[in-house]
Amino acid sequence: MFSYLRFRYRRMLRRMRRTSLLARKAITQYVDRHIWGKWHQVRVVRRFLVLWGVVTVASGVGVLQQVGALGGMAQVAVPVSGGTYSEAAVGTVSNLNPILPESTAASDID
């Protein structure tokens, strides 16, 4: 029983080593071909890269200016709906007669 488990374990290790070796080889070939191998073509498309860089920087500056300008406008305090509104007058009120008020507080209430 032990020899069979050892056999299965060693087979699994060999398979994993082989798979990792093949994956490493494929990744190395891909990087060599598509990244390092294409680097010489930068000279051919240099002006397009510069143009896209200028467009990207100009767009970034424009976005930052818009965010700065609109940020101040969005921070204006405005009242929200709901809540309770109360108003008060200073002094005592004994009679609420608008024709003949007894005090300034009674005259302010009408």
Image (tube, helix red, strand yellow):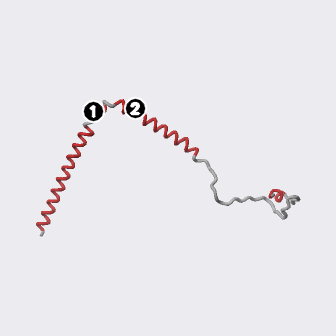
Outermost residue, left side = 3
The amino acid at mark 2 is Leu
**Cα distance between the residues tagged 2 and 1:** 19 Å
Compared to residue 58, the image places residue 4 above or below, namely: below
Q: Secondary structure at mark 1?
A: helix
Outermost residue, bottom side = 1
Q: Provide the residue designation for mark 2.
A: 51
Q: Is residue 22 left or right of residue 53?
A: left
CB of mark 2 within 8 Å of CB of mark 1? no
Q: Provide the residue designation for mark 1.
A: 40
The residue closer to the viewer here, 88 or 26, is 26
Q: Quadrant of residue 56?
A: top left
| Residue drawn 26% across the image and 40% down it | 34
| Residue drawn 83% across the image and 59% down it | 106
- Indicate which disc residue 53 carries: none
The amino acid at mark 1 is His
Q: In the rendering, at what x and y percent does residue 93 appear?
A: 82, 63
